[in-house]
Image (cartoon, rainbow, N blue to C red):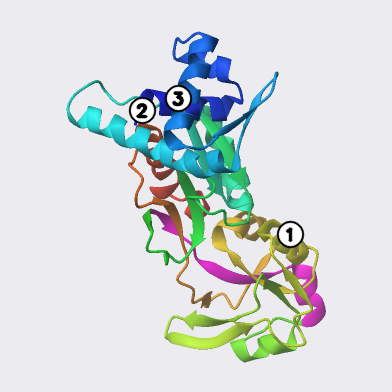
Amino acid sequence: MDTECLRLFVLAAEKSNISAAGKVLGLAPSIASARLAKLERSLGSDLLHRSTRKVSLSQEGAEFLPYAREILAQEDAARAALGHGKPEATGTLRFTAPSTFAQLYIVPMLPEFMERHPGIRLDLRLSDVKYDLIDGSFDLALRNSAMEDTSLKGRKLADDTRILCASPGYLAAHGVPKAPDELQQHQLIGFAARTAKPLMSPTGPEGVFDTRGHNARLTMDNGLSQKLATLAGAGISANSLWSVHQELKIGTLIRVLPDHIVDDPSMLWLIYPKSNVLTAKVRVFIDFLLEKIGKAPPWLKP
């Protein structure tokens, strides 16, 4: 398979324009169109829908795109291994991360990263929805969960300590729980699936944070919304320390059962498919996040 045709296809898919993709590779529009047609004939499928103004991926093209990117990444890595040129950090990096974490810690640092690596374009999907890395053609993802998928590789970015907290107003009105078994007398805020979360004290497991009872009338699937509801006095919630550390410092949230943490295997992971070559653009972004966040997490600074 002609990898130059694959490179042209990937560029055309990204730019939604065959002529623009050909221009990047120094090809006249007619030659670019002919090469893409040749690729489609060799595969026996129409990869692109063409119109007078732009092109769009066919269903077959969308399914083939991540494999085309993988073939090109493998070729670039092989050439680099043989000393044929230095792999430069260029191209479009598709990255997904939870919205709240990204807004607090990643988005503010992007100008510095883009200044360091002017050859990289960032295509970000910042949402609490967990996109499929393969189907979405993502190069990298940040996940705050347990590393369970065996088809993925990962680098730990930081611990994800989870604690209980509430607003001063809520605690003034409803009292401060002194032990885990008193939580069932309070309004609890659930996150996504309602499951009982064990609590860990300095001496071992002690109690649970259970949002399945009648006292958990509010359940959310967005971390920022949960924090805002807690700030507004809706009840006690379990939050990642990175999400609420500023509010704890200024006193708009109070830690509940401060000697306990939620016993949860979740960590902050940077993950990518096992089959993917760790290309230069992915490597430099991982290194940047480890430098800025992993070495000294901002939420642990005094």
The mark tally for this picture is: 3
Can residue 129 be seen at all in this image of the molecule? yes
The residue singled out by tag 3 in the image is: 38
Q: Going by the picture, which residue comes out furthest to the bottom?
A: 181
Q: CA distance from mark 1 to mark 2?
A: 46 Å
Q: Nearer the viewer, mark 3 or mark 1?
A: 3
Decide which of 248, 233 is in the foreground and name it.
233
Does residue 25 belong to the magenta stretch?
no
Cβ–Cβ below 8 Å for labels 2 and 3? no
Q: Which residue is mark 1?
A: 225
Look at mark 2 in the image and give the residue it sits on: 3
| Quarter of the image that includes the N terminus | top left
Q: Is residue 108 above or below residue 260?
A: above
Residue type for callout 2: Thr
In the image, which is nearer the foreground, mark 1 or mark 2?
Answer: 2
> Distance between the Cα atoms at labels 3 and 1?
51 Å
Mark 3: few, some, or many residues within 10 Å (few <14, many ≥20)? some
How would you rate the neighbour count of disc 2 (Cα within 10 Å): few for under 14, some for 14-19, many for 20 or more?
Answer: some
Query: What residue appears at the point 69 percent right and 23 percent down from the top-left corner?
Result: 51
SS type, badge 1: helix
Q: Position of residue 111 (x, y in %)?
A: 55, 28
Left or right of 178, for residue 293: left
Sequence-first tag of 3 and 1:
3
Q: Is residue 111 above or below residue 192?
A: above
Residue 251, percent from left and from top: 69, 60
The stretch of residues the image draws in magenta is 155-174
Q: Is residue 171 magenta?
A: yes
Tell me which label, 1 or 2, sits earlier in the chain: 2
Secondary structure found at label 3: helix
